[in-house]
Amino acid sequence: METKKVLLTGGLGYIGSHIVVSLSDPSSAIIADDCSNCDLKQIDRLKQVIPFEKNQVIVCDVADLEAFEEIFKKHKIETIIHLAGYKAVGESVKQPLAYYTNNLNATLNVLKMCNKYDVKHLIFSSSATVYGPQSSPMDESMTLLKTTNPYAETKAISERMIEDYCLVHPEFSATSLRYFNPVGAHPSGFIGEIPSGIPNNLLPYVQQVASGKRPYLNVFGKDYETKDGTAIRDYIHVMDLADAHVCILNNPKQGYRVYNVGTGVGTSVLDLVKAFEKATGVKIPTEVTHRRAGDLQESVANASKINKELGWKSRYSIEDICKDAWNFEKHQSN
Ligand SMILES: NC(=O)c1ccc[n+]([C@@H]2O[C@H](COP(=O)([O-])OP(=O)(O)OC[C@H]3O[C@@H](n4cnc5c(N)ncnc54)[C@H](O)[C@@H]3O)[C@@H](O)[C@H]2O)c1
């Protein structure tokens, strides 16, 4: 009998790769990815960090039920970590149907396979965007308000689909992890975030300014009601985020759970620029421009629930994050 497998949908992407290298037994991982936002060179990068076989990756669209089901016919899947989905907020506003089609069909198919093949555990990559425009710190007991974009809506609906499934499958264990702002890279420098085109997120943009790929950083708004006028986010090292998944895998519990995964510390745009300059010695020129539509003033987690219930706590500082991000950027440029 084959050993029980952990299936990571979208596992070749940024966060999935860091989870794979953090598993106590990476040989138990199977990745299903359609490569819509990554490429197969990621397999070679993973091989630099852990023993990993090419046949652990199956190129497959999770939103295509027939193709996805082939995996379950061949492997005994005990756990699914469901990361597959499109993730760009701005793009989701312009292409709502693409986001609803891909993200919701993927979650639906994951649940159908859990049902048909008796999968025991599910961890879902949710997002702090499900809170909508609420004040920080955000905690899991807050009622979810109307979200502000289709991407966030796909996360809120997916959470609801999983919760409803759990109601009629009380033996099933499912956890939605609401990620705040995952950043940074594996300390080896071999894996990290590889944005396609212009980075949507702050730190990847800062990295590209530091490496000379872009001339300066646009600071979107310096008139927020914050200590320095710039927007505040809760940046979490991607290795801390990966550890939170390992922590859930080691503490399965029947029923549905939701946890924020953040540090609980707010960092402004200018704080992050300063931390990057201090950690790397590289100066980041900035230019202040208008606010971006839809950006929240502040998004910070109350992370006490996962701290108390599972003992998980972030370990990396903002300087560690910047150091590892820069190390990865330099590896990429070489
Ligand atoms: N990175 C963030 O800032 C962030 C924040 C909150 C939540 N999340 C969520 O975490 C998950 C992983 O994010 P990431 O940053 O690693 O993104 P990513 O784009 O790097 O990884 C997602 C992977 O899913 C794949 N994919 C997309 N649709 C697919 C489909 N139908 N079938 C198979 N594969 C498919 C892509 O090719 C990609 O490799 C996503 O669901 C994202 O929405 C990310």
Image: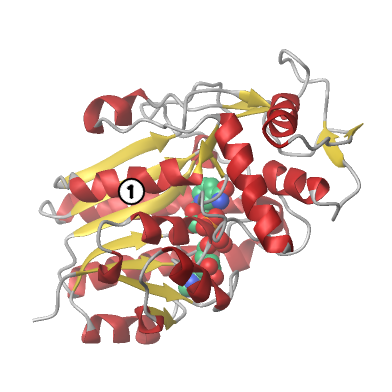
Name the element at disc 1: helix
Pick whichever, 13 or 106, lies toward us.
Answer: 13
Q: In which quarter of the image is residue 189?
A: bottom right
Q: Does the closest atom of ligand 1 sit within 8 Å of the Cβ of label 1?
A: no
Q: Nearer the viewer, residue 200 or 18?
A: 18
Q: Tell which residue pokes out farthest to the top in this image.
A: 227
Q: Which colour scheme is used?
A: secondary structure
Q: Quadrant of the C terminus?
A: bottom right
Of the pair 314 and 50, the residue shown nearer to us: 50
Asked which quadrant contains residue 7, the reply is: bottom left
| Residue 152 in view (yes/no) | no
Give coordinates of residue 119: x percent, y percent: 19, 66
Residue 333 place in picture, x, y as percent? 74, 62
Q: Position of residue 158 (x, y in %)?
A: 41, 54
Give left or right: position of 94 versus 237: right
Residue drawn at x 58%, y 53% is 151
Residue at point 23%, 29% (across, down): 309
Q: Residue at x 26, y 73 (%)?
A: 113
Under mark 1, the amino acid is: His
Vertical side of 99 occupied by 133: above or below: above
Position of 291 compared to 71: left or right?
A: right
Residue 60 image point, x, y percent: 45, 81
Residue at mark 1: 245
Q: Going 83% across and 20% down the picture, which residue do you hit?
A: 223
Tag count: 1
Is residue 33 shown to the viewer in this render?
yes
Q: Which image quarter holds the N terminus?
A: bottom left
Q: Quadrant of residue 141?
A: top left
Label 1, residues with CA under 10 Å away: few <14, some 14-19, many ≥20: many
